[in-house]
Amino acid sequence: RDGGYVHFLVRGQFSGRDSHGRARHIIGTYTDITALRANESVLHIALENGHQGLFDWQPLLDRVEFSHEWYGMLGHSPGSIVSHSDNVQRLLHPDDVAAGRAALVPMLKGERDDFQVEHRFRHREGHYLNILSRGRAVERDHDGRATRVIGTHVDVSTLKATEAQLRESRQLL
């Protein structure tokens, strides 16, 4: 309309072939996803500004996907960590593994819809970041087990440092 570009999602399939196996007909759709792309851009900006990363976890398949912001928050390039839970667990501070598991298990079993836990994740440079992890089971199987969990990781390191300084200041008074 305004002379700009439009983003389309194109899907199709062959509906008939000739005697040589070549496609005779293709049936498909074009879907305008321009607005979706614009919303995606806004989401990325919001995640970056909030020092947040997004995760999409399929626990029964042991597969987890992370946003570019999640990787950046931990000093990694997108895709540099293989998307399996054991690789993510290696980033956790050893003292925080049990608390993380305790927060997750009730949600995974169907006893809760969501979880929240604070734990420390190791940055690529070796130091730890305080991360507030929140997630919600958005899909479940017929037994009530979570099959898909979507959530955020928020870097609360600065907040934790400020809280520690405040406690120290109060002790001096």
Image (cartoon, grey):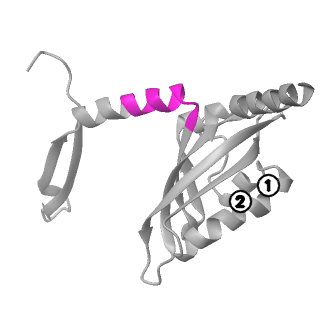
Q: Which residue is mark 1?
A: 96
Q: Amino acid at mark 2?
A: Gly
Q: Secondary structure at mark 2?
A: helix
Question: Which residue is painted at 65% across and 50% down in the image?
Answer: 82
Q: Which residues are magenta?
A: 41-52
Q: Which residue is mark 2?
A: 100
Question: Which mark is drawn over residue 37?
Answer: none
Judged left or right of residue 66, residue 126 is: right
Q: Do the residues bearing badges 1 and 2 touch, measured as CB atoms within 8 Å?
A: yes
Q: Is residue 79 above or below residue 19?
A: above
**x and y percent of residue 72 in the render?**
62, 31
Judged left or right of residue 46, residue 21 is: left
**x and y percent of residue 95 in the render?**
85, 55
Extreme residue in the bottom direction: 143
Extreme residue in the right direction: 172
Q: Amino acid at mark 1?
A: Asp
Q: Main secondary structure of the magenta part?
A: helix
Question: Which residue is painted at 13% across and 54% down in the image?
Answer: 26
